[in-house]
Amino acid sequence: APKAAPAPSRPSKQYSVEQFMATTKLSGASFSPDEKRILFSSNESGIFNAYTLPLTGGKAKALTQSKTDSTYSVGFFPKDERILFTRDQGGNEHNHLYVRTPDGKDRDLTPGEKLKAFFVTFNQDDSAFYALTNERDARFFDVYRYDAKTYARTLVYQNDQGFNFADVSLDGRWLAFNKPRTNYDTDIHLYNVETKELKHITPHQGDVYFSASTFDPGSTALYFLTDQGSEFKRVARYELATGKVEDVERADWDVMYTSFSRKGGYRVTAINEDGRTVIRVHDVKAGKPLALPQLPAGDITSVSISDSEKRMAFYHNGDRSPSNLHLYDFGTKKITRLTDTMSRDIQTEDLVDAEVVRFKSFDGMEIPNIIYKPHQATASAKAPAIVWVHGGPGGQTRKGYSPVLQYLVNHGYVVLGINHRGSSGYGKSFYTADDQKHGREPLLDCIEAKKYLASLPYVDAERIGIAGGSYGGYMTLAALAFHPDAFKVGIDIFGVSNWLRTLKSIPPWWESQREALYKELGDPAKQEQLLRDISPLFHAEKISKPLLVLQGANDPRVIQPESDEIVEAVKKNGVPVEYVIFPDEGHGFTKRKNEVEAYSRMLGFLEKHLKAAGPAPVN
Ligand SMILES: CSCC[C@H](NC=O)C(=O)N[C@@H](Cc1ccccc1)C(=O)O
């Protein structure tokens, strides 16, 4: 494991929430047709908008100027200056697909109420592109082909089977769909657009994960991920002409994705190596991975290779450095950093590196975690601590820069990002170990995480809290309700309090996942008692520790009554409860003003109810 970077030789400087949130967040990368500029999304203005930046560097230019709804770039048209972008309304996840013409005019390509749409890809000669919308049936996404000039569209596939679309071949002949039975037992179906034949290509016995990733650019094979006969996912391919299947690439960990450059010269694979992303770029003709120049320790993400295959854009981030856009030149083999997103006021030496640590849980299962230790925490100046629980349930806390976690650490809190059983990235057995056991075994892992923290010489065992978002918010509420003495405080960020209601009210577009979700968590029609037993709302009278709840009013996944009702119930216990509703957010905070409000409320709550409950703070 990499050694943590040293603390500064002076006392660490403390920064405000505004200073931490002034870090710019970027996402996406698409080359302009002349490969002189790059299109991406940035929250530089306080809200996400689409920007372009010359490859020679300089200042980014905003193409969209939304002040109300977070707006994300999708990509340039391959042969002209039009761009595609997407936005929802206040976090409701009704994403529409828009085109912006060089004269600054926008056109909604997916008009209508309460629909959700995704861009897929352009076809081989760029005369058309594909998009998905659920406008016909809110439950399922149909596949449309749009003329790239007129935007006239045709329905290519009416999805009545509840398939999850995966890819379309560049020649337009093939569509690949995934069909989940459970989260770990899935199938691939192949549709021939010309013959209209649908073929199930992954007949199998037992629980096996098959997930179509991409067609090769020559439209000869479908590349997919599978864990057949293994704990971990690898890359395999299915030859379209013959149906022959062969393994392509494996690692000692899960392969996260594999994708081709448009001409097929390169294939990029990402591997989830113990909480960080490792990228392999394969030279397809040479049949071997490229040796890329060394970068500082950290992750490469969002790799995008230009159509000429002369350039590659990607993001790089480290534990102490936020994601920055980089450019690799295949000719000169040089990497150039194009952006500088770190908040101007923050010196990276005041931040901390994350480390992977493992403890044995109550039944001997090994639990991986990512820990952040404040520089000033020592055996003689013990720090308060927080168990931080990710969403999902099958998410993962990963290494890399997190402004909110660094903010808490900078203010003296040890943070342990637990990857309890059921988290992604550690094999099939670990991933499925929480199924139908929510509120019990994975929650006990969080209780053991508290014991682990309490055993560390630099942690004050009397001042340990729990916090998390969504499923992590559920874990927080469950810990306070079912293990009322374990933690001193809880922070529930849009967490589930009543699984019966949440599982009945899932967004309609999750229909294809409904069965898998019910198999994982419980079926509200058949397992009412189980879901009552594990739902904190029905046990709220046991909550006796201070609670902070944060909720987006437009969240379609964990709806506002989940938070309203737990707040009302816990208040009856005479317990300190703080509640903040964000009227213009959904399942997550996307606007800087809301991040500032949410995270300063978090710190204020911790300072009052956790830090102040112990010895004088150290610095
Ligand atoms: C399409 S089902 C997967 C649920 C999804 N998982 C990935 O993050 C999700 O949004 N989970 C919520 C929690 C939740 C689970 C089930 C029903 C509603 C909400 C989360 O972000 O943790």
Image (cartoon, helix red, strand yellow):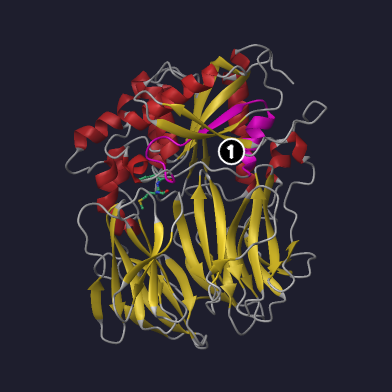
Give residue 171's position: percent from left, percent from top.
42, 85
* Numbered disc 1: secondary structure: helix
Mark 1 surroundings: few (<14), some (14-19) or many (≥20) residues within 10 A: many
Give residue 562's position: percent from left, percent from top.
38, 38
Q: How many marks?
A: 1
Front-most of residues 40 and 372: 372
Q: Is residue 399 above or below residue 412?
A: below
Which residue is at a point 52% across and 18% down the rendered structure image? 454
Give residue 203's position: percent from left, percent from top.
22, 64
The question of residue 583 being in magenta is answered with no
**Mark 1 sits on what residue?**
598
Q: Is residue 16 above or below residue 608?
A: below
Which residue is at a point 69% across and 81% down the rendered structure image? 34
Which residue is at a point 39% across and 48% down the rendered structure image? 557
**On the rendered image, what quadrant is the N terminus found in?**
top right
Left or right, residue 478 beside residue 369? left
The question of residue 413 being in magenta is answered with yes
Residue lying at the far right in this picture: please name it: 10
Front-most of residues 490 and 462: 462
Mark 1 CB in 8 Å range of ligand 1?
Answer: no
Bounds of the magenta segment: 401-425
